[in-house]
Amino acid sequence: MKLILLGPPGAGKGTQAKMLMDRYGIPQISTGDILRAAVKAGTPMGLRAKSFMDAGGLVPDEVVVGIVRERIQEDDCKAGFILDGFPRTVPQADALAEALTALGRPLDAVVSLAVDVEALVERLTGRRTCRDCGLGYHVTFAAPKAAGICDACGGELVQRDDDREETIRRRLDVYNEQTSPLIDYYRKSGLLSEVDGMLSMDAVQDEILAILRKE
Ligand code: AP5
Ligand code: ZN
């Protein structure tokens, strides 16, 4: 199964990708997670990416295309993968198509998650992540048992630097300008399915599974 999860910041791409990863045993490829790890490690790529990410803008295409081109060739991607947060521009989508054609492994499906703007802002301002194990929470919709502490490992829950309201609004503008044209792009190629991302996490997962069963 080679799948793209498309949707604005906070639509639930990461949440759904992790659920699918557990079910299908295929990796989640999140360019956001890979870039944040590079920033944390202080690599040259991380240093280059940080200013774009902090401002809520996109990291240059050639950087993310390079990351994904290498990642999809790794052994654990042979059975498939879930792309989360990539592609985000038409040139990225073209580069992905070219790389997958060269590998002889075309995409199976593109699932687009639609969520209202105010719900996106509420989801992102309330998102928390475990500093130690990376598990995701929401202060209201997926709250930990004890406030600020990870249920799984006892680690501290932290907020992402770009989850401040001003940066969130900028990320949403960037999505509308640069990423939303991909909905039509994949509709034209016949790969697109649209899911109501306003539903509960489990209901969204059921909708996605129903789509994948048809593939
Ligand atoms: P990235 O990390 O990809 O962030 P994003 O696309 O903005 O997406 P998010 O991770 O914010 O949201 P999500 O859809 O995964 O939602 P989640 O499941 O966490 O990118 C960050 C930055 O990196 C970019 O701004 C850019 O600078 C750079 N970058 C990354 N990829 C790039 C690329 N390809 N090209 C260029 N630059 C790139 O859910 C959000 C919250 O809502 C959670 O708290 C969750 O618990 C809750 N929630 C989820 N689903 C539901 C539901 N159904 N009901 C209620 N709550 C829910
Ligand atoms: Zn944890």
Image (spheres, rainbow, N blue to C red):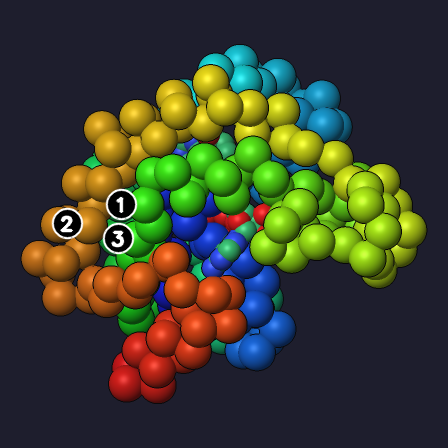
Looking at the rendered structure, the kind of residue marked 1 is Ala
Can residue 169 be seen here? yes
Whether residue 212 is visible here, answered yes or no, is no
Task: Give the Cα separation between the discs numbered 2 and 3.
Answer: 12 Å
- 161 or 109: nearer the viewer: 161
**Residue at x 13% of width, y 66% of height:** 190
Three-letter amino acid code at the position of disc 2 = Tyr
Where disc 2 sits, the SS reads: helix
Mark 1 vs mark 2, foreground winner is 2
Q: Which mark is residue 97?
A: 3
Left or right, 6 with respect to 158, comes to left
Disc 1 + disc 2, Cβ < 8 Å: yes
Camera-near label (2 vs 3) is 2
Q: Residue at x 89, y 55 (%)?
A: 153
Residue type at mark 3 is: Ala
| Marks 2 and 3 close (CB-CB < 8 Å) | no
Q: Which residue is mark 2?
A: 185
Q: Is residue 164 left or right of residue 143?
A: left
Circle 1 Cα neighbour tier, 10 Å, few/some/many (<14 / 14–19 / ≥20): some
The percent position of residue 109, horizontal first and vertical second, equals: 29, 68
Mark 1, residue position: 93
